[in-house]
Image (cartoon, helix red, strand yellow):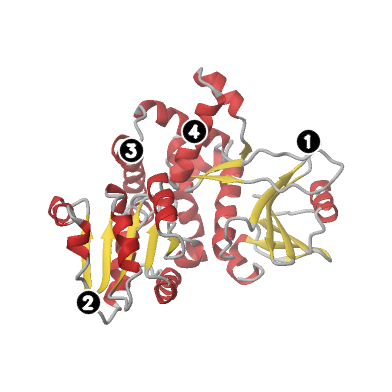
Amino acid sequence: MISRLHHINALRRLLKQFPIVAIIGARQVGKTTLARIFLRQQRTAVTLFDLEDPRNAARLADPMLALKDLRGIVVIDEVQRKPEVFEVLRVLADRSPRQAQFLVLGSASPAIIHTSAETLAGRIAYHELSGFSVEETGLAHLNKLWQRGGFPGSYLAASQRASVDWRSHFIRTFLERDIPQLGINLNASLLYRFWSMVAHYHGQIWNSSELARSFGVADTTIRKYLDLLTDAMVVRQLPPWSENLKKRQIKSPKVYVLDSGLLHSLLNIYSYEELQRHPKVGASWEGFFVDQIIRLLDLRRGEYFFWGTHTGAELDLVVMRGRKRIGFEIKRTTAPAVTPSIRSALTDLHLHKIYVVHAGDESFALHKQIHAIAASRLLKDIPWA
């Protein structure tokens, strides 16, 4: 069992502040397991409703009747199946004295986020759960985590073959069952084709027009597909940072398949040797470390971006936290160097420092404001971690 202490502590902190806490994340990422581990540590009554169980769904046919007399912590799993529950939770959260707290679990989707945000403003806190991070698995297993991804079923599989099979099954059921359950009616084959094309765009600037021509649909339709996969937490759109410069800056997002294991399956990469030879190996490495840095630094939306200009200068990750501005460039090389792009970003964006994450074994200074960080020393040498 891999400890998820950071997430347990976050849930404990949030439930001290809010009557309702939502754990949101992609399907099969470990939301239910995390909730059960957390609940075993609580000294209070616990009532669990799993809305994938028809008996539990029947108990919540009248949500007010089922929930109003409960005490302690009430858990509602797969809450996206019954969004009308949020109206009842608003009433119950406002009672004084408070009789119960609510822990709701569900896939990140418009049905959950929008409904609960409108209904429960000021009463609910969100905790996003992703797959395992390098902080949880340890740097000794870095390559395994990169190759298999962080979904527990894939990472913990007994063999590489079993990991590949798990991911193939996940992709199929996600498209054929989970997406329709979110109220979205799209052809599974079409969405698989689109997701695969996103995988080939991994680490690149998004171009809706190019994909729209490939699919024979409008730009707005392609954008809707991308937003759908983003809301389901299987794709990341990394927003651009725009500074008041004379240079023309890129204003479209970069796109990444959020989990490296799913990326490799969508690209038909089934072994570490195939990954090393694949033309997307550098982009895969970049996306993996962009995700790990965001999680290690516990960054919130609005604190991280990428930067690029139409003349070719770019930086993989720009972090804005308070008055600090830090840049990250990620290179799959054992010989990192100061490039013209790095110098341009340092000057134009008024960065305090730039860190070059590389595949070598040592961390060292490249310049008084530019430092190379070895991937094998990431947990020790990354700033703020």
Q: Which residue is mark 3?
A: 183
Task: Specify whether 100 is left or right of 25.
Answer: left
Q: How many marks?
A: 4
- Point out which mark residue 310 bears: 1
Q: Earlier in the sequence, mark 2 or mark 1?
A: 2
x and y, in percent, of residue 27 in the image: 35, 49
Kindly report which numbered mark, 4 or 1, lies closer to the viewer in this rendering: 4
State which quarter of the image contains the N terminus: bottom left
x and y, in percent, of residue 141 in the image: 47, 61
Q: Earlier in the sequence, mark 2 or mark 4?
A: 2
Q: CA distance from mark 4 to mark 1?
A: 26 Å
Residue at x-position 79% and y-position 60% = 351
Q: Earlier in the sequence, mark 4 or mark 1?
A: 4
Pointer 3 local density, CA inside 10 Å: few below 14, some 14–19, many at least 20: few
Q: CA distance from mark 4 to mark 3?
A: 14 Å
Q: Is residue 374 above or below residue 264?
A: below
Residue at x-position 59% and y-position 36% = 279
- Point out which mark residue 224 bears: 4
